[in-house]
Image (tube, rainbow, N blue to C red):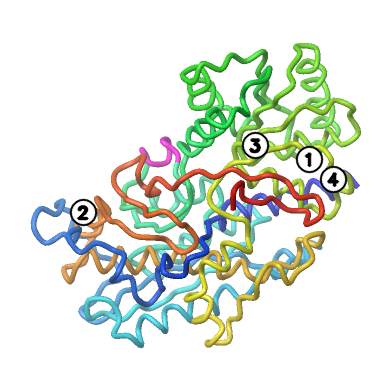
Amino acid sequence: MRSRKFACLGIVVALSIAGCTSGDDDDSADVEADDTSDTATDDTAADTDAPADDRAPGVTEDTVKIGVNYVDTGALVAVGLNYDLGDFEGAYQALFDAINADGGINGRMLEAVFAPIDPTGPTSADAACLKLTEDDDVFLITGFFLNDAVLCPLDAHETAVVGGMMTPARVELAKAPWITDLPDTDLPESVLETLAETGELDGSVAVFAATQDRTTMEDIVLPKLDELGIETVDTAVMDAPVDDTAALQSNVSLISERFESSGADTIVLVGPAAANWPLYQVESDYRPKLLFLDVVAARAFGTNAAVADTSQLDTSISGGPYGPDQARWEAMADCVAILDAAGATSPPPDDFDVNDRSNQPYQAGFFACPNMALVTALLEAAGEDLNYGTLQAAMDGLTLVVPGDPGERVYGPAPAGDGNPLAYLFTWNGDKRDFELVGG
């Protein structure tokens, strides 16, 4: 049962990371995928001092070829993970069609090239990358990128990307323009600042992270806590193999005993893999206040149908982009209308049982709407002379409201490659089995 529970949790975390954007109650804040002229600045168009990079794969006088990665739900079903995540190809194609019906971008029609990815297999992402970059020769790739998979187009094949999660190491390796709607590694700093301002860090604080989030803990979280004047009583890294549930259980239990002995009544949980803390503490009597620096981790545990007892979350706080899902969906009303009209329906999240996370057909819209808004705004700002030089110049100072994010983003060189989205806090609602925006 443990191995099955962990496998499902892993898929939920992976998909949530890649598709997690944010929401707003004001439809006027949305960027329609076929019209970003009201929110994207025109002065970023690179027609004067563009970098000397005239590469323009997939660009002709009349068309721009755009690659789209998406989650192959058929591959998930084949291994017993019966997720309904919506019609990814249909959602993206609907937005491509809407853009083209409105005259395209700077006189060019957008041509979509699709590449489904099996997130449970080790080679699928590389094969999709090779197809899009070498066989199809696309101008840029958008969609689903799991962890370091984004480096295949950016580093190995020097192809531009819209999407994926930025880290300093990945940015350093990128050899093509890169922009994303997903928060990068400086979001935890913003979350910590907000937690400190609201007094949530006033207790005896310990910090927990998994191996994959160790760098974030050591290079970002601990220095930020020190800057905020927060003393930690202990820190620990869960370093058991991710496929060994017995070792994970033992590792977390030992850390828990250590934290309890140190008097920690507040645990700062770092990164998406921090979902392992509550998962392997279900049977423990130790109940400190949990502060998740990534709402993805909190939701991966709390909304996992295999978890019966979510009481650990009763006093928890999580941070991250605007949400939860229903708010994000409501913020994308204009884009959702385009999808619905094209038959790629994106239903409201509240229509589905929160105890059954296998049914999330709105996820396709959560990927397609923000990604295509960014693609549209970026290509428009780059101007008619479209190449990697003008595309890179267009990113610096690009200003827009991404669908699902109530705050205006201003893009630029890293760490502004994500537009520096705002951080929000969430509390657990046990009746709804989901997190709610504080003050929302």
Q: Earlier in the sequence, mark 2 or mark 1?
A: 1
Amino acid type, mark 2:
Ala
Residue 259 location (% of width, % of height): 76, 18
Question: Residue 392: image x %, image y %?
Answer: 25, 54
Q: Earlier in the sequence, mark 1 or mark 4?
A: 4
Q: Residues within 10 Å of mark 1 (few under 14, many from 20)?
A: some
Mark 3 highlights which residue?
A: 292
Q: Cβ–Cβ below 8 Å for labels 4 and 2?
A: no
* Other residues around mark 3 within 10 Å, as few (<14) / some (14–19) / many (≥20): many
**Alpha carbon separation for disc pair 1 and 4:** 25 Å
Mark 3 lies on a secondary structure that is strand
Under tag 4, what secondary structure? Answer: helix
Q: Please state the horizontal and vertical placement of residue 68, each as a whole percent of the image.
A: 47, 68
The tag on residue 3 is: 4
User: Within 10 Å of the Cα at label 4, are there few (<14), some (14-19), or many (20+) other Cα atoms?
Assistant: few
Q: Residue at x 65, y 18 (%)?
A: 235
The numbered mark at residue 393 is: 2
Name which residue type carries label 3: Phe
Magenta segment boundaries in residue numbering: 167-172
